Amino acid sequence: MAEGIMKKFYGAGTYVQSVGVKGDAEIDGFAIAVCQEIGVELSRHKVRGFDDLNEYGEDLSSFDLIVALTPASKHQAEELTRIYHLDVEYWPISDPSGQGETREAKLDAYRKSRDQIVERLIDRWGAPRENA
């Protein structure tokens, strides 16, 4: 969600890639649904892990900042960046997976996470750009 929202809010002026601890999962349908509510398209998004970066022609040394959203990703980012000069910020976002019994309750959990990401992005980089 964070990559899609960042691109929607701030456009192509900032290069952003989303990676996680595991890259072998499919994009979550609930994440797609709640992001569509705010005009963010995620259905073609590919889930990548830190280990997948090289496969996609990326290298951690080409980034300035890693924003970790979970304790596990924070730990892995800090381990991987010991030899690189880049910052790691930790934004503790609630994990919506496994929350809620009904479809609407699950969507509410994902909306909460989405809204936390939106709030952190705006706190860090300001109001979304028009026509980004």
Image (cartoon, rainbow, N blue to C red):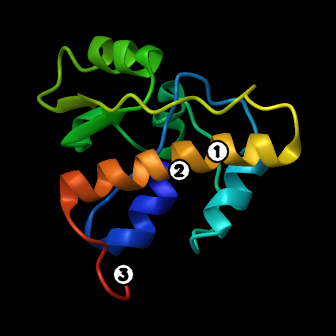
Residue 40 versus residue 16 in the image, above or below: below
Q: Nearer the viewer, mark 2 or mark 3?
A: 2
Report the side of 43 relative to 66 (left or right): right
Q: Nearer the viewer, mark 3 or mark 1?
A: 1
Q: Residue 78, percent across and down?
A: 27, 16
Question: Pointer 3: what residue?
Answer: 132
Cβ–Cβ under 8 Å for marks 3 and 1: no
Instruction: Give the class, few, some or many, for how many residues have Cα within 10 Å of label 3's Cα (few <14, many ≥20).
Output: few
Q: Amino acid at mark 2?
A: Arg
Q: Nearer the viewer, residue 94 or 55?
A: 94
Residue at x-position 17% and y-position 25%: 84
Report the side of 42 relative to 25 (left or right): left
Residue 45 versus residue 67 in the image, above or below: below
Residue at x-position 66% and y-position 68%: 36
C-alpha span from label 2 to label 3: 19 Å
Cβ–Cβ under 8 Å for marks 2 and 3: no
For residue 69, which quarter of the picture?
top left
Instruction: Give the class, few, some or many, for how many residues have Cα within 10 Å of label 2's Cα (few <14, many ≥20).
Output: many
Q: Is residue 7 something one can see in this rendering?
A: yes
C-alpha span from label 3 to label 1: 24 Å
Q: Residue 56, percent across and down?
A: 51, 45
Q: Nearer the viewer, residue 66 or 92?
A: 92
For residue 80, which quarter of the picture?
top left
Residue at x-position 45% and y-position 23%: 70
Cβ–Cβ under 8 Å for marks 1 and 2: yes
Q: Residue 108, percent across and down?
A: 68, 47
Give the SS element for disc 1: helix
Question: Pointer 2: what residue?
Answer: 114
